[in-house]
Amino acid sequence: VSYGTMLPLAFAAKQAKGVFLVPRAEDCQALWDKYHMLDNIREHSTGVAQVAAGMAELVQAKGMQVSREMAVAAGLLHDIAKTYTIRHKGNHAQLGAGWVMQETRNPLLAHAVLHHVHWPWEGKLEALVNDDTHFVTMAIIYADKRVMHHQFVSIEDRYADLLERYGTTEQIRKNIMASLAQGKYIEQAFSRRFGVQLDEYTLDSGRLVHRA
């Protein structure tokens, strides 16, 4: 098969209209190369994918149907546009969602990328956390808040770092604190769903394990 200038994933997406493609890790890594993702962002994205995978495994262990593969892909691709926006400005979540939709034709995956920084609507977060349709989006919002650079940390430590690095104005600090509050709420909602305290867990070898 001749793909022309397209990656195999994008070629398959064009052929499989109406089918939601879930890219494999190697597909995601090919997209990292295509969009010139920096090494430190690759390390962070790998960590986020591992946290999301561990969360999917907790849901699956309860007999619920969620896609671990989709969670991993969303974690690997959530910052796909970060390098571009560092260099040229712009909203990396919005641009990344557009790129992911273009490459995979998968709206659920693009949705997770679009909203990974902050869920814009309040009031129904508990219901969304408990709705398998929205699991990947909610998991990536949370997983991104548990990985600082490439290290697995508490949400509080992650946001202390964000405040130190980016909290240059009162409005920015207010936005960061609002995102922290949302992350804690999602963490508590997932903890109730899983029957474990996620703030006491970190990740090791692709699984969520208790932090001593």
Image: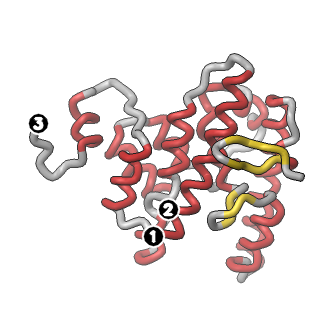
Badge 1 marks a residue whose secondary structure is: loop
Above or below 208: residue 160: below
Depicted 46 relative to depicted 24: above or below = below
Q: Is residue 208 visible?
A: yes
| Residue that carries the numbered disc 2 in the rendered image | 42
Residue at (65%, 33%) from the top-left corner?
Answer: 56
Q: Amino acid at mark 1?
A: Leu
Residue at (41% x, 76% y) in the render: 88
Q: Is residue 164 left or right of residue 51?
A: right
Q: Position of residue 18 (x, y in %)?
A: 32, 24
179 or 123, which is in the foreground?
Answer: 179
Query: Which of the two residues, 149 or 131, is positioned nearer the viewer here?
Result: 149
The residue positioned 77% from the left and 60% from the top of the image is 153
For the residue carrying disc 3, how many other residues have a C-alpha within 10 Å: few (<14), some (14-19), or many (20+)? few
Circles 1 and 2 in contact, beta carbons < 8 Å? yes
Q: Earlier in the sequence, mark 3 or mark 2?
A: 3
Q: Are marks 3 and 1 in contact (CB under 8 Å)?
A: no
Instruction: Tell me if residue 119 can be seen.
Output: no
Residue 24 falls in image quadrant: top left
Mark carried by residue 38: 1
Query: Could you tell me which residue is drawn at 51 percent across and 34 percent down?
Result: 69
Query: Which amino acid type corresponds to the residue marked 3 in the rendered image?
Result: Val
* Quadrant of the image occupied by residue 71: top right
Q: Amino acid at mark 2?
A: Arg
Identify the element where label 2 is drawn.
helix
Q: Which residue is mark 3?
A: 1
Within 10 Å of disc 1 (Cα), the crowding (few <14, some 14-19, many 20+) is: some
Residue 55 position in % (x across, y down)? 69, 37
Q: Compare marks 3 and 1 and give the one earlier in the sequence.
A: 3
Q: Which mark is residue 47?
A: none
**Percent of width and height locating residue 4:** 11, 48
